[in-house]
Amino acid sequence: MHPFFKSLLITCHAAALCLSAARAEQPNFIIILSDDQGYNDLGCFGSPNIKTPNIDQMAKEGRKFTSFYVPSPVCSPSRAGLLTGCYPKRIGMEKHVLFPKDNKGLHPEEVTIADMLKARGYATACIGKWHVGHRKPFLPTNQGFDSYYGIPYSNDMVHPDNKGKYRGSQDKLWLNQDEMVKLWNTPLMQDEEIIELPVNQRTITRRYTDKAIEFITANKEKPFFLYLPHSMPHIPLFVPEDAYDPDPKNAYKAVIEHIDAEVGRVVDTVKQLGLSENTYIIYTSDNGPWLWFKNHGGKADPLREGKGTTYEGGQRVPCVMWAPGRIPAGTETDAIASTIDLLPTLAQLTGSPAKTRGEIDGTDISPLLLGTEKSVRDEFLFYTSNGKLEGLRQGDWKLLMKKGKAELFNLAKDIGEQQNQAKEMPEKVSHLLNRMRKLDEQINHQIRPQGKIAG
């Protein structure tokens, strides 16, 4: 062989080895997102009756985040924020949830976590509830994901226009699972096609997990990103027969314990494939519990209120992060963090440029993952379910403006938001009010349009 070509071959081979080594060092990421799960609805977060041994074990082997927030108290805006690292208002997604008749969604030009990681050579998959636009331009396959399998919106919504929804007793539904599942004309999609209508919701949590395990196994030799947003425990509640408890009072408990078992299957797969030292698993919820539904909804104790509110119970959610050898085991942090911080954090962990369509609101919290107790984020804005600015947390202090009246709480001493100190501390109220308006005004100048199609 001519020396030149031999040298070229050696150089190419060395480059290929370097690329292969670099890819091998890139960590995998799995984000597991439950729907409407309360702060108190895990054993490791204090639930007195819900048994979650698998997620509790993740906490023992990883880190609990006890001041972890979502950017909206309802699901569509919250999910859009997680995917893009932005407050929903910045990307035009703040106006409550999307419905089957809507012709709008997350703009395809927004850069999602999946877009960012796919550009780094990651295999990407979304398996579960999407709910940031079910029309073709807004589906996961047009938002950075190689594949999609799941329900495109909430599991209480029906195809094609949400008409004829079941509005009866949730207890009655629970007692007649096999029959009642037929009342929800909710679709299951594969990529961009409906493959099951109505979807059998009794088996959907397990089927999501089956697909997740298939994806992890198929991509064990390359870096991957799996976004696994479960449809449960959003009502209506369903479980397979082997997880069923006939007492409606235990409906919510049964669903969470079933999710926990399925999370255990995912973690076991990662361990069995020898991927645990190179995989981050993040478990959290999209917003607080739907208290209105009582035994079909969760609890946010000791927090105040739940889903749909800007009180802590609406937006502070349980979070566990797991990565043996990377995240210190058996630790917890009360530093402020949020789902909008995940995109810049994953960018830092992969050496990716956090380049997006425009400005983002997230901050790199990788030091918190890796063990520091120093708060990376000191402020967090609170917007209502319709996108109205309502509050700011700064350090231990939280200000809410409810119908023009100030509510001021010291969360370090009053996590349940019961002692309004606004009258005693007018200067603190004025400071926080001016600061939250300033931050919001910055976003107002940089709002990007929501995606829309004619029809």
Image (tube, grey):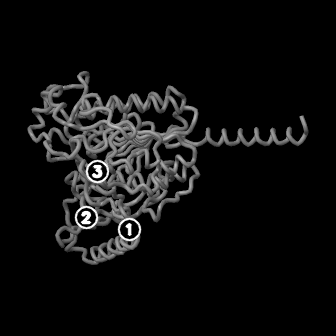
Which of the two discs, 1 and 3, labels the residue nearer the N terminus?
3
What residue is disc 3 on? 75
Q: Residue at x 31, y 43 (%)?
A: 152
Q: Secondary structure at mark 3?
A: helix
Q: For the view shown, which residue lies furthest in the right direction? A: 2
In the rendered image, which quarter contains the C terminus?
Answer: bottom left
In the picture provided, is 273 more to the left or to the right than 23? left
Q: Secondary structure at mark 2?
A: strand
In the picture provided, is 225 more to the left or to the right than 238? right
**Mark 1 residue crowding within 10 angstroms, few (<14) / some (14–19) / many (20+):** some
What residue is disc 2 on? 409
Compared to residue 129, the image places residue 428 above or below, namely: below
Compared to residue 28, the image places residue 272 above or below, namely: above
Q: Residue at x 35, y 44 (%)?
A: 284
Q: Residue 425 location, x and y as percent?
A: 25, 74
**Mark 2 residue crowding within 10 angstroms, few (<14) / some (14–19) / many (20+):** many
* Callout 1 amino acid: Ile
Q: For the view shown, which residue lies furthest in the top direction? A: 242
Q: For the view shown, which residue lies furthest in the front direction? A: 455
Q: Secondary structure at mark 1?
A: loop
Which of the two discs, 1 and 2, labels the residue nearer the N terminus?
2
> Looking at the rendered structure, which numbered label has been put on residue 447?
1
Mark closer to the observer (1, 3): 1
